[in-house]
Image (tube, grey):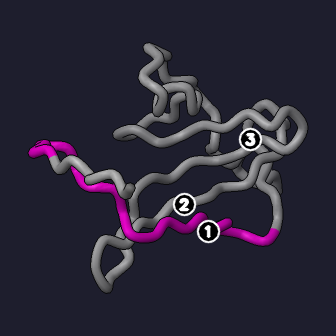
Amino acid sequence: MAQKQVRRFSRERPPPRETRVRVLQNTTSIDKSGRAFVPFAVDVRFGDEWQDDLAGCVYRGSGEIFVKRGDSYRPAAFLLGKNVEPVAGVCEAAKARS
């Protein structure tokens, strides 16, 4: 016997039809601390058009993931509801030396 799906009204955004992750550059960048990272973006599609949903970076050596919120980057645990503070200097490429 098939179960009926219960539809409830919610003010939450419905889940996207499709999600994709884009790596934004082919090479790693180096931050002010000398650590290598790769920036990424997550896009979602609800209808026919893709929309930017979130941006961030992944650190190669440690695997740490940071996501952008406003003008700062926080550990990815922020997306799981954890109360984590922004981390200064992450996901920002150091200026090239001349």
For the residue marked with disc 1, what is the amino acid? Arg
| Above or below: residue 13 compared with residue 61 | below
Q: Residue at x 21, y 47 (%)?
A: 6
**Element marked by disc 2:** strand
Residue under pointer 2: 41
- Name the residue at the bottom extreme: 48
Of the two numbered discs 2 and 1 on the same chain, state the one appearing first in sequence: 1
Residue 58: within the magenta? Answer: no
* Mark 2–mark 1 CB contact (< 8 Å): yes
**Element marked by disc 1:** strand
> Quadrant location of residue 46?
bottom left
Estimate how packed mark 1 is, as few (under 14), some (14 to 19) or many (20 or more) residues with alpha carbons within 10 Å. few
**Left or right: 80 as drawn, with respect to 70:** right
Residue 31 - label: 3
* Mark 3–mark 1 CB contact (< 8 Å): no
Q: Indicate which label's residue lies in the foreground, 3 or 2.
A: 2
| Above or below: residue 26 compared with residue 13 | below
Estimate how packed mark 3 is, as few (under 14), some (14 to 19) or many (20 or more) residues with alpha carbons within 10 Å. some
Q: How much space separates mark 3 and mark 1, taking CA atoms?
A: 20 Å
Residue under pointer 1: 22
